[in-house]
Image (spheres, rainbow, N blue to C red):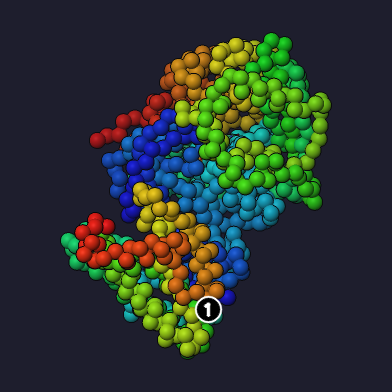
Amino acid sequence: MHTPSRQTLEGWGRYPRVDSDVLRAESRRDLVSAVTSNGEHPVLARGLGRAYGDAALLDGGLTLLMERLDRILDFDPETGWLKCESGFSLDDLVRIFLPRGWFPPVVPGTRFVTVGGALASDVHGKNHHISGSWASHVRNVELLKSTGEIVFCDAERNPDLFWATAGGQGLTGIILSMEVRLQRVESGAISMETTRFRDLEEFLDVSAAHVDWPYSVSWIDGLARGKSLGRGSFMAGRHAPAGSKGKAGLLSKLPRALVSGRFLESNLLLNGLSARMFNAVYYRKQFSKRSRSTVSVYPFFFPLDAVDRWNRMYGKRGFFQYQFVVPPDPQHLALKQLLTAISESGTLPFLGVIKEFGTESHPGLSFPRPGVTVALDFANTGQNTLELFTRLDDMVADAGGRVYLSKDARLGVDAFRRMYPEWEEWKRVRDEADPLNMFQSELGRRLGLVGEMPA
Amino acid sequence: MNVLILGATSRIAQSIAAEHAKDGDSVLLAARDREEVKTIASDIQVRHSTRVLVGDFEATDVDSHPGFITDAVEALGSIDTAYVVFGAMGDQEGSQQDFSAARTVLDVNFTGAVSISEALATYMEERGEGAIVGISSVAGDRGRQSNYFYGAAKGGYSLYLQGLRGRLARSGVHVMTAKLGFIDTPMTYGMKTKIPIASPEATAKALKNAATKGKNTLYYPWFWRFVMYLIKAIPERMFKKMKI
Ligand SMILES: Cc1cc2nc3c(=O)[nH]c(=O)nc-3n(C[C@H](O)[C@H](O)[C@H](O)COP(=O)(O)OP(=O)(O)OC[C@H]3O[C@@H](n4cnc5c(N)ncnc54)[C@H](O)[C@@H]3O)c2cc1C
Ligand SMILES: NC(=O)c1ccc[n+]([C@@H]2O[C@H](COP(=O)([O-])OP(=O)(O)OC[C@H]3O[C@@H](n4cnc5c(N)ncnc54)[C@H](OP(=O)(O)O)[C@@H]3O)[C@@H](O)[C@H]2O)c1
């Protein structure tokens, strides 16, 4: 058994930071012995640390890094079923399988996530309205429980445990491996269409007009007020036919090491003026109402990945992403109320996206629900930022919506329980799966999802 | 080309196997953890679509080594290049307190490595071709109070490889000694040092390139040659007082 090392860990938003004993598992053996011989310490699996807040953080206890358990166990080129260990990353997946004509069924906005993390967050992508989220495309999930027992679960086998694990933020056990079904694609390019929209009404019209496009997402100007409230730019895409070549992103032409947020560690983005300029330039960047192009999958799905560690640009205090979904409402009252509250607050978001989710949703703590989701990045400017979020939480909960736990670092228990009424049933399944309360995280503790570990 | 990798569950070994598989070489992965080595084999197979075989191998079971080589040759067809990668750092303090712990370090890193290298030498010498890459360590260049059992075993293995190189040169068999510095594996994980730690992937590339070029001794990362040159230059009367 290797010895753990004491480290300070943070999520992608760099807030909060905690100290933990960290062990990088090199084999399945390491995981089993960490769980079985570590009875008296809490344990948490960690993928590539792309959750923004404290989902992958554990103060004290033992954090198990999964990144080396990244082996492919099997692939069936007839059906597209890929079996792999949970530390396998979507970066590797795309690099290895796209040239063979396969693509993940769902991708988040970064490819630097593990498949284990993708299931533990039940991630959604630009195709949610067509394909649902990650858990809809997996089977035979292999889970290591706190007893050391290994069980299989999916929508058919042990469904309760499966739906508690999908979106369960690592609190049911350690995901060892899974099968995920890749989709066939004809090329590594995306045909895309961009449409500018003036306000929320127009966003919903444009969105409705593009429902048959498999991918869609929009940038939204979180600073616009009044008549321009909810203005932005809608991007729809589909995998391009065989032989298509897509343009690579501008930044991807430079060596990755050069395009790094490390060198930009500054408080640049803390400043309201830079946020205003960025948003205004982005809105005007596109002159025509509508344009078409063919681009590579990389800039289309993972635009921010071109800048290594861009999270450093928010400085040492870090930043937050506030992502919520509110149920469909023809008058989008809640949406308007939320966007107004944000644009009128002194706390300005830097980057925002808006998307209409499809009707599919999963039990447990999985985030996606029918409606409109908005995600906005805010620099951590202290108390005022947190106060704004608390106000937004109320509006979201009142509207029957919820915030995304994988992006969250500060939601309170009461608001959480209003947003996720499923929590109690989820916790019952969790407690049954892990009676020792071995699996813990800062998020789990903050939201009352895990009990104390018996001494 | 047919490649044998001994101690295949180490991340360095996995990367060596992948480097060869990328070129279409067949690889036989030998290790003591059957389940783990099968996982590694399927990974390499899917990523690189080459022939990947697995075999059981225990370094300290020296009596099994000649037979293991015979079986490996039969399974692969031949052994063109063999990498002796397994090793165990042990625990210096534990080894001082209990000689059986020290003995395991010597048995794995020295006796086991020598034994399997001898079996390979016999096979390759007779065949008149092949290459043996022995993974040793910069720790074997000078005895240090903080890990002299491991250092002695690795140093002994380096000397053994040096002698073997001379013996096999006449039969067209190449022997390379790889003296590794800090590589990012459990042996160094969490170590607080200013010295850069190399990735197993980069290490594997360097090993394969050097072996292909017929290098005799490889220090990797390269600057360790100079670091060790300096460390060896420290007079013993000073060195013995240094806490390293
Ligand atoms: C730039 C960016 C864009 C993003 N875009 C999206 C998006 O579009 N849609 C979306 O849904 N999400 C998005 N995310 C969030 C991200 O996809 C999730 O947080 C994802 O879970 C991160 O995966 P990871 O491997 O880094 O896991 P980590 O961040 O390391 O961990 C996340 C959670 O998964 C658990 N976990 C990880 N591995 C295992 C395992 N093997 N077994 C059990 N539990 C495990 C951890 O305990 C933790 O609770 C984005 C994040 C970033 C940084
Ligand atoms: N990492 C460094 O900084 C560094 C520096 C200098 C030299 N090296 C050398 O590099 C080589 C690879 O080490 P590593 O860093 O990758 O460490 P590692 O992960 O600990 O690998 C050691 C390997 O040796 C195997 N092994 C140990 N005892 C064995 C036995 N009795 N029989 C068969 N196999 C046995 C292990 O198998 P199991 O998986 O079954 O335990 C494992 O595959 C070793 O020779 C090491 O001495 C490493």
Identified at 47% across, 58% down, the residue is B200
Identified at 48% across, 39% down, the residue is A49
* Picture quarter with the N terminus of chain A: bottom left
Identified at 39% across, 77% down, the residue is B161
- Label 1 sits on residue: B80
Does the image show residue A375?
Answer: yes
Residue B239 in picture, x, y percent from top left:
25, 62
Q: Nearer the viewer, residue A408 or A163?
A: A408
Does the image show residue B37?
Answer: no
Vertically, is A111 above or below B231? above
Q: Quadrant of residue B119 in the image?
A: bottom left
* Picture quarter with the C terminus of chain A: top left
Q: Quadrant of residue A378 in the image?
A: top right
Residue A38 in picture, x, y percent from top left:
30, 45
Identified at 64% across, 17% down, the residue is A223
Crowd class of label 1 (few under 14; some 14 to 19; many from 20; radius 10 Å): some
Q: Nearer the viewer, residue B202 or A339?
A: B202
Q: Is residue A67 left or right of residue B244?
A: right
Residue A159 in picture, x, y percent from top left:
50, 39
Subunit of mark 1?
A: B
Q: Nearer the viewer, residue B4 or A260?
A: A260
Helix or strand or loop: what does disc 1 sit on? loop
Q: Is residue B98 left or right of residue A281?
A: left
